[in-house]
Amino acid sequence: MLSEQMKKLFEAKLKSVQQFLEECETGDAEALKFRFPCCLRQLCPIQEPVPQENIRVGVRRWDCLPRLTLPWVTGDSMFWLVPSLPHHRCSHLPVNCTASQKPAVLTDSQQPQQEYAHSIRLDGDIILGGLFPVHARGERGVPCGELKKEKGIHRLEAMLFAIDLINKDPELLPNVTLGARILDTCSRDTYALEQSLTFVQALIERDGSDVRCANGDPPIFAKPDKVVGVIGASASSVSIMVANILRLFKIPQISYASTAPELSDNTRYDFFSRVVPPDSYQAQAMLDIVTAMGWNYVSTLASEGNYGESGVEAFVQISRESGGVCIAQSLKIPREPRPGEFDKIVLRLLETPNARAVIMFANEDDIRRILDAAKRNNLTGHFLWVGSDSWGSKISPVVQQERVAEGAVTILPKRASVDAFDRYFKSRSLSNNRRNVWFAEFWEENFACKLGMHGKRPGSPKKCTGLEKVGRDSTYEQEGKVQFVMDAVYAMAHALHHMHRELCAGYPGLCPRMANIDGKELLAHIRAVGFNVGKPQNCKSQLNPGSAGTPVTFNENGDAPGRYDIFQYQINNRSVAEYKVIGHWTNQLHLNMEVLQWTTGNSSLPPSVCSLPCQTGERKKVVKGVSCCWHCERCEGYHFQASEFTCELCPYEKRPDQNRTGCQPIPIIKLEWHSPWALLPVFISVLGIIATTFVIVTFVRHNDTPIVRASGREMSYVLLTGIFLCYIITFPMIAAPDVVVCSFRRIFLGLGMCFSYAALLTKTNRIHRIFEQGKKAVTAPRFISPASQLVITFSLISVQLLGVLVWFAADPPHTFVDYGEQRTQDPGNARGVLKCDISDLSLICSLGYSILLMVTCTVYAIKTRSVPETFNEAKPIGFTMYTTCIIWLAFIPIFFGTAQSAERMYIQTATLTVSLSLSASVSLGMLYMPKVYIIIFHPEQNVPKRKRSFKAIVTAATMTSKLSQLAAERPNGEVKTELCEGVEASVPPTKNTYVSYTNHAM
């Protein structure tokens, strides 16, 4: 199904015909001549313009009324419509119809050349069509614009040169001459379609029944050229438009520059082939270039039409499938851009400043104007141009715009420079190249001069001499597609050669079987062609394209294989701009990154990314809908970067490494001996152990002295053992935990306190019972002997030991690493603490019994506070218990209040060991240091006194109790008097006496 655009074209043509007929009605023959030259030439193809009197203008006086037909395409069929206008018909078929001569048939050689003033015609046995953009697209309704020297003339001459070489080749198409009919497309698809109708004239059935000449004779139609194949076109939009017509008449077409992927559809463009690879390969190569540069955020810019739009579409599709490149903007350049349009496009590209790379599928004219707009807007050096093969290595887009184009990376199908063509083209002149009807215009343009009064450059002051020489008096560089033009011509020639060999074996020249060449059969031979560019198959021609040596082949869709050279437009130190080959692409990219140059002397790779790469340990949080734009978020806390987009939590016993790309074990610590938290408890403990050992040694050495005996030797040794254990527990608490150390901690943690307070409780309980019993009777209470005291003490201690045994049985001691105690917010400070499995509850239970004994002992100390200080140790024990209670009351908030502290292990261990040592020190200092002092420094006081009976002791205690009550009820003077009166008679004054009741029977 053909496009609506073609229908519009035909409607416009119909309108032009109506206008033509109106001109005929008015009788303005000059207007007819200049406004419709083609139609006039087809009406009366003559050497000179027909005198006006020989052309009768008007309905009644128009004697030459050729039939006018219009092509209309619907589906796969073409109809020739005759407009329903009475008496007015015009034909697109040339006829001989002069006013004074009888119509006669004109042979090909006899047809005047003025008929082809806008085309090139070469006689030959086989005629090939050619479509070239000799002129640029015109503006403001004008079909054609300025001459295109490289893309137009160079390519056109390449076809003529290739035909010359083939016609001279005795082995390729021997005795067969190739001819040509070459047309100008003016870089416009609609105009090219109109021109291409010339190629199908010979296949249109003629109807001259209603055509009469002035003398009444029927016209004899001139024989048109039968085109068997077409070379072209250049632009993909033009090739698509022309291919829709040529396929209906089964005329094969080989393009030398059209790369739109759409043309690979063999169901729609079955007679189309090309010697250049399609843009699907080109788009992949350009994507590989962008990826190699590290660019992931680019904009695209396309010229409106099949080439630009399909090229960008292929690039976007491939980039979307690969997922590595995002498109910031996709802009389109209109066919007919308004003034200021290119400035708007450049400013729109600037709306996404991070997308510096611009992928361009645009024609040569649009590229030049885009670069100019960037230059006007002071954006030189900002954009990173990546051009398709329409840019390639052409000079014209970058002339006078070298700085803004610097660094542009372009792509071009792999080619070789044809040296023979350079020699051929440089030898062309006005005198030896008359067959090229546009060569005179090229001459003026190339040498900036004017040819005669009717030259195309009326403003040029310089006149052409005709002696100028290409390459000497003007710059010359072979256009990039010259080789492909020649490849296309040679491909058609090889196909015809194979067809001739098959159909006309041994027949010189064309045989009758090739009089009417079947386009479908020719297409099959084209698709089977295969030859090397440097050495054409079965041809010893002068073609010497250089070192490329790339074979010309076609796949089932008529496409050439993908082989590209990659260029960069660089300005060297001498300020000379040139295209430099930086790599090639053949199914994969080979790029020499070392030769890249972005600004003068700078080889660093410029960025074109939406977001900068995240640092190690940061994840990408992708912006919704734009996969190449993201925010970098650091993996915080104990998370590490598991992938580009995710952070994961490390295992509990691990923490992130320095780069947060993985996890590493958390360091395990324990309380070291050199730590300040250990030095103080150890120092106190060592002093306590030394003091306790000194007391024990002193008591052992003076075991039988009154002071030692009065203290209760057996209970004193038990109490000193407990004090020693309280000091010694510091060392297992600080030592590195293992099973043995943990076992010692469980056993001795509460055992030392239990020994101490069990002994003190037994003592205070005995004193309390003695004096309470004395108030009731003179008999001594039970269980006050030393043996009974030891039994009671060890009974109390056994409860602690029994609890420890149960603990061992229920939960055997072991170590573990506590990772939660020092799990700080900063993983770098996190530590695992090696511990024994003693929980806070276990600690409370272990010390709880000892604290219970301590509280009970304190209660008894309070009850025995009224015992005279001359009677044993009740008051020192009381002071000891009061101080101990204060120590442990201070211990509880310090120990449990630091449970959440990062220094918990150090604080709790130091607090516990110091509290135990202080408790032991209080007991040691208050109960035994005074005795040791007397034993060592005042041995005279450590002498035996007379023994007193239990009755005397109880009586003295009772008397003391009564006196204490009187002291509370009377004034001081009275009390003192009564005390003196009551005591003088019975108790003589004496020194302090240590009374022993250890020998009383139970």
Image (cartoon, rainbow, N blue to C red):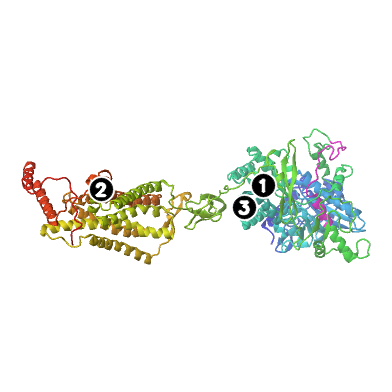
Q: Please name the predominant secondary structure of the magenta segment in the image.
A: loop
Indicate the secondary structure of the residue bearing disc 3. loop
Q: Amino acid at mark 2?
A: Lys
Of badges 2 and 1, nearer the viewer stands 2
Q: Amino acid at mark 1?
A: Glu
Within-10-Å neighbours for mark 2: few <14, some 14–19, many 20+: many
* Place of residue 371 in the rendered image (x, y in percent of width and height, measured from the top left): 67, 42
Indicate the secondary structure of the residue bearing disc 2. helix
Q: Is residue 412 magenta?
A: no
Q: Which residue is mark 1?
A: 336
Which residue is more in the foreground, 137 or 347?
347
Calculate the distance from the C-alpha at mark 2 to the C-alpha at mark 1. 120 Å
Label disc, if present, on residue 246 of the rendered structure: none
| Quadrant, the C terminus | bottom left
Calculate the distance from the C-alpha at mark 3 to the C-alpha at mark 2. 93 Å
Whether the residues at callouts 3 and 2 have beta carbons within 8 Å, the answer is no
Indicate the secondary structure of the residue bearing disc 1. loop
Q: Which residue is mark 2?
A: 931
Tell me where residue 642 sits by quadrant: bottom right
* Place of residue 935 in the rendered image (x, y in percent of width and height, measured from the top left): 26, 47
Q: Earlier in the sequence, mark 1 or mark 3?
A: 3
Which residue is more in the foreground, 707 or 581?
707
Which residue is more in the foreground, 444 or 817?
817
- Magenta span covers which residues? 464-491
Q: Earlier in the sequence, mark 3 or mark 2?
A: 3
Q: Which residue is mark 3?
A: 325
Q: Amino acid at mark 3?
A: Val
